[in-house]
Amino acid sequence: MFCGDPGAPGYAACAHQMTIFAIASTIPAMLAMVLMVAAFATPAMRVDPALRTRTLTYAVMAWAIAGGTLLMGALPSL
């Protein structure tokens, strides 16, 4: 989102909101990392290829959510 000039009223609140979006994007990113590690490290996942594929699909979806959240906070508003 576009916060305007640093001296403008409400700039601090807008910048704080951008920081909150950046922090919020770490939650699905951490979930995606845990799912990817589990897909390759867990013995049950190594045995069942369908379960591994499903887990990796969920990890990719979590990465997409994390990226979308980060972009939503970083891009200027339209």
Image (cartoon, rainbow, N blue to C red):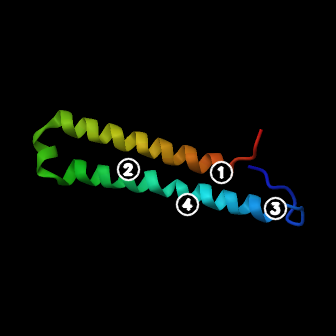
Question: In terms of secondary structure, where does tag 4 sit?
Answer: helix
Write down the quadrant of residue 49 in the picture. Answer: top left
Asked if labels 1 and 3 touch by Cβ distance under 8 angstroms, the answer is: no
27 vs 21, left or right, is: left
Q: Residue at x 23, y 47 (%)?
A: 39
Relative vertical location of residue 38 with respect to residue 49 in this rendering, above or below: below
Say what amino acid the circle numbered 4 marks: Ile
Q: Mark 1 — residue?
A: 73
* Mark 3 → mark 2, Cα distance in angstroms: 33 Å
Asked if labels 3 and 4 touch by Cβ distance under 8 angstroms, the answer is: no
* Mark 4 → mark 3, Cα distance in angstroms: 19 Å
- Mark 3 / mark 1, whichever is N-terminal: 3
Q: Quadrant of the C terminus?
A: top right
Say what amino acid the circle numbered 2 marks: Ala
* Mark 1 → mark 2, Cα distance in angstroms: 20 Å
Say what amino acid the circle numbered 3 marks: Tyr
Question: In terms of secondary structure, where does tag 3 sit?
Answer: helix
Q: Look at discs 2 and 4 and give the one toward the viewer.
A: 4
Q: Residue at x 30, y 50 (%)?
A: 36
- Mark 4 / mark 1, whichever is N-terminal: 4
- Mark 4 / mark 3, whichever is N-terminal: 3
Q: Mark 4 — residue?
A: 23
Asked if labels 2 and 1 touch by Cβ distance under 8 angstroms, the answer is: no
Q: Mark 3 — residue?
A: 11
Where does residue 7 sit, x and y in percent of width and height?
Answer: 89, 66
Q: Residues within 10 Å of mark 4 (few under 14, many from 20)?
A: some
Q: Residues within 10 Å of mark 2 (few under 14, many from 20)?
A: many
- Mark 1 / mark 2, whichever is N-terminal: 2
Question: In terms of secondary structure, where does tag 1 sit?
Answer: helix
72 vs 3, left or right, is: left
Q: Mark 2 — residue?
A: 32
